[in-house]
Image: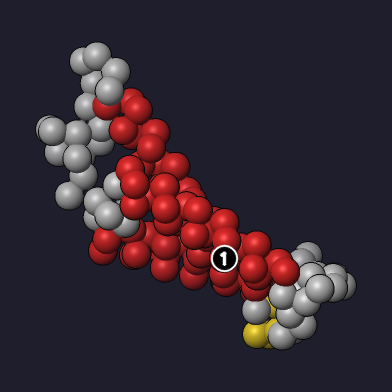
Amino acid sequence: MPGIYLIAILVSAAGIVAIDARLSLAFWRAPVRTTVSIVIGTTFFLVWDAVGIATGVFVKGGSALLLGIDLAPQLPIEEPFFLAFLCYLAVVASGWANRRLARRPGRSAPGDEDGRDS
């Protein structure tokens, strides 16, 4: 079924957004920094993909799960969504790990003395 991969990415992203909203781990704690991190990470990985495609290392392959729309040769439209999801997941996981580390006796999370990043 075309589009199921993109739907899966969006549903997964919605789950991470819900976790982030509930626990205030990334975007709800520092929206500008989170957005900048996601944009920089996604851009980095899109450039990485472009280099991999240009050198013949990355090939799209055929799948009925993709929409069939390419942004460039061998670069399906789903790729930027996946990369942004991956970057957001990493930022949220980092926020969770920092919070867990800050709860350990005698420790504080990276950032301000109160354990919160600005």
In the image, residue 24 above or below residue 50:
above
Residue 47 percent across, percent down from the top left: 57, 71
**Residue sitting at the far left:** 113
Q: Is residue 48 above or below residue 77?
A: above
Q: Secondary structure at mark 1?
A: helix
Is residue 59 visible in the rendered image? The answer is yes
- Along the line of sight, which residue is nearer the eye, 63 or 110? 63
Q: Which residue is depicted at the point 42% across and 47% down?
A: 19
Total marks placed? 1
Q: Residue 84 appears at what percent x and percent y? A: 51, 64
Q: Is residue 28 left or right of residue 37?
A: left
Where is residue 49 shown, x and y percent of the image?
65, 68
Left or right, 116 with reference to 2: left
Tag 1: residue type?
A: Leu
**Res 45 quadrant in image:** bottom right
Few, some or many residues within 10 Å of mark 1 (<14, 14–19, 20+)? some
Q: Residue at x 65, y 79 (%)?
A: 77
Q: Residue at x 49, y 70 (%)?
A: 43
User: Residue 42 location in percent, x, y?
Assistant: 50, 66
Residue 30 as seen in the image, left or right of residue 47: left
The answer to which of 56 and 24 lies nearer the viewer is 24
Please give the residue where the numbered disc 1 appears in the rendered image. Answer: 10
In the figure, 87 relative to 76: above or below? above
